[in-house]
Image: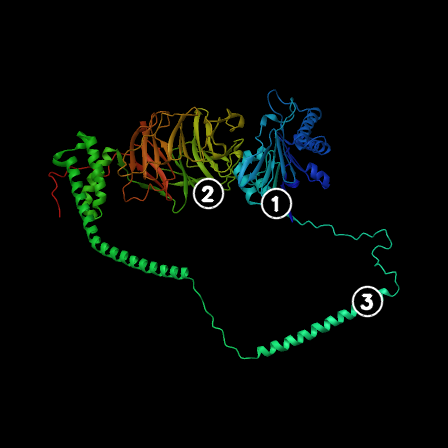
Amino acid sequence: MTVRLQMKLGLVAESQRPPDSPDTVLVVEPSIGSTTRTKGNLYLVVTGEGGAELRSATNMVAERVRHEYYYDESAGITVCLKKAIKAANRELRVTERLVPRQGEGGPIGIALAVVRSNELYVATVGPAEAYLVREARLLTLPEPDLASGLPSEDGAEPVVWHGELLAGDSIILISPNATRRIGLAPIQEAVIQLHPQVAIDQIHRQLAGGGLGVAGGDGMIALEAGEVSVTQKSQPLKPVWPSDSLAGVPDHSPIPLAESVVDGVANVQHTAKQVQRTADGMLRHSVYGLFDRMPRRPVQRVRVTPIAVQRERQRRVASAIVGMLLVLAVVGASLWYLAGTRHELKLDQQGRAQAAYLQVQSDVFAVFGNGRNLLVSDPLTAKADLEDAYRNLQIASQLYPPDQLADLTTQVVGGLNQYFHVNVITPQVVLSFGNDDLSGLVLGPDGGAYVIDQTNDTVYRVDLATRAKVAVAVKGEQPIGGGTVGSPHLLTEGGPDVLILDDANTLWRYVPPAGATGELGALTRVNVEDSGTWGAGVRAIGTFVTDSSLGLYSLYVVVPSAGQVLKYLDASDNSGYYVKARYSYLLGENLSVAHVDDIYIDGSVYLLDGGIAERFDSGQQIRGWTADPPGDTAMRPAAPSYTRITSDNSVADQGNLYAYDGGGRRVVSFTKTNGKYKQEFVLPSTSPYFSALQGMFVRTGANGSNPTLFWIESGNLLSAPLSASSLASPSPSISSKPSPTK
């Protein structure tokens, strides 16, 4: 029994392909055994960077490569493939009259694979890609060169990769349009988990973008190598007749009747031997039967145990007895020790708690005793004493009830809050949405709060004065101008507009009505030419006003699939955003924005990446700019991890930034210019909020006065004025040194 490889094939059905696709897919699996053994199977995808007008060119290239490869017997597979591609390039230049620009590659790409037995040959030219999936790892074969497209003036010279094909390997030949739009990760996952045909169908559905239709090339082939057992049956032997007519005939004696006499004598001898054997057998059977009937003495079975085995058994029994005695001794000693030390441990804990309580009193007296206030006269000493008092309060709380420690706790916590500029703010519910899931919040240009309600797939405008809410965008709505609103995903303010990005990466503009008319504004679709290439999982969006008089603003989109913050310049006629006006904002290599949670833009771009605040100017990260840590590690030991960011001033380098730290349940404020720590805001210890904040903004009065924080959390829109007020003012109520307590 031998094993050979069989290829499982998957490709897009011709009926499912869009009419504007320029790609051509060709599969050749010869039925002639000699051709299969010498040339193998050919799988070919010819792609085109253009519309349906390139379909004839790609068809011609595919047929030319197939014809030249299978009819060229002058060399091996690698040389024949190169010659076939060069021949297609020559014919393309003559018949189609496609001439590339100077220094640029042509619009036609080729991705092909040849499978011969367990050998694999892969080659790519121009805008076409080939991948090998082996042991759940995606390998590029070979590295694509987009500048080498056909037609080429110097004659395409592809690199042909040659290697061994193993059972379980998968090969993907695909148009770069598909990898750009949906990414490599979904393609790899589909090929690994599904049959090649099912995987291709799923990839093509994802390329269609949720029913919006495939745009551009969709050529793709998926192959999977599987083992097939082959049973080899040997050729049965056939008799060969000799040419001699007397061959095989027994010889006869020349003496007449000699054979008959000899045969008779032989028969007599054989009969005599048979009679002798029969008589001997009967005699033996009679004698043995007589012996069997005689009485016998039973034989006693004696077992002999070797001395080595006996000694080993004795050694094991002794070891078991000694082990049991040791276990009993250890258990008894442990019980005796624990019975004696449990009481000592309890006494030790009580002693530590009492000592900690006295130390707290001593530290508080050192800071506030006899009318002193070291927070004013010697802040560093006061900080050290109060942090020591806070640690000892945790130990004392194991013995003393909270009401007995309340006064000391008020002075210690209040003193630390005063030193670290920690302000306690009082939350108020502006509007409750019940149990709805709120996921986005932005301050609109009309002074209203715009909230995403994911439970109802609706964007609401909340009047902060009257607390009335009205729906401005609802999933399934079809505004004037065309399009259907999807599930709202992200919000941002853009000059005089509020921008809404839905889950289909469609951007909508809501223009509030002028004045307090009580009417609804206009909702229209914003044309973003390549929003379909963003893929799923856009992390954040933001804008920067470029011309306030015309209402123009640039659009920033955090796209993980591109590893970039994409910047779009608005068209001068306010008609939308186009590819020609798109830029990759971040500068550098090996960029990733997969962990960006929020963005704020005022000329500089501030990103919250993996919980860390970063500043970028003109796409370059400002290395010397860091957000200072708050420093109150005694009460909040964990380092801050920021997930939401806003500001109280939209002018560059003016005002302060505010960042939400969920682990510390606080909002930290620092300057824009150098990230210097200013203050932080917390809620009373009895408040349940600041645990799952999903969005926030700061609204100020005239000249930046009376800043107020608004945020959404647990189905509520909340607010709190950012006025300076400590948890409890440290009153120096201790006038004498503490006395020991029993």
What is the three-letter code of the residue carrying label 1?
Gly
| Left or right side of 374 for 48 | right
Q: Is residue 277 above or below residue 179?
A: below
Q: Which residue is mark 1?
A: 226
Q: Nearer the viewer, mark 3 or mark 1?
A: 3
Residue 242 shows which numbered tag? none
Q: Where is residue 710 drawn, in percent x and y? A: 35, 37
Give the CA distance from mark 2 to mark 1. Answer: 46 Å
Q: Is residue 377 above or below residue 300?
A: above
Secondary element type, mark 1? strand
Q: Residues within 10 Å of mark 1 (few under 14, many from 20)?
A: some
Query: Are the two marked residues, 2 and 1, in contact with CB atoms closer than 8 angstroms?
Result: no
Q: Quadrant of residue 451?
A: top left
Q: Nearer the viewer, mark 2 or mark 1?
A: 1
Secondary element type, mark 3? helix
Q: Residues within 10 Å of mark 2 (few under 14, many from 20)?
A: many
Q: Where is residue 558 drawn, in percent x and y? A: 46, 32
Nearest to N terminus: mark 3 or mark 1: 1
Q: Which residue is mark 2?
A: 457
| Left or right side of 663 for 368 | left
Residue 263 shows which numbered tag? 3
Give the CA distance from mark 3 to mark 1. Answer: 68 Å
What is the three-letter code of the residue carrying label 2?
Asp
Nearest to N terminus: mark 2 or mark 3: 3
Residue under the image location 30 percent in, 30 percent down: 677
**Residue 69 seen anywhere in this rendered image of the structure:** yes
Q: Quadrant of residue 74?
A: top right
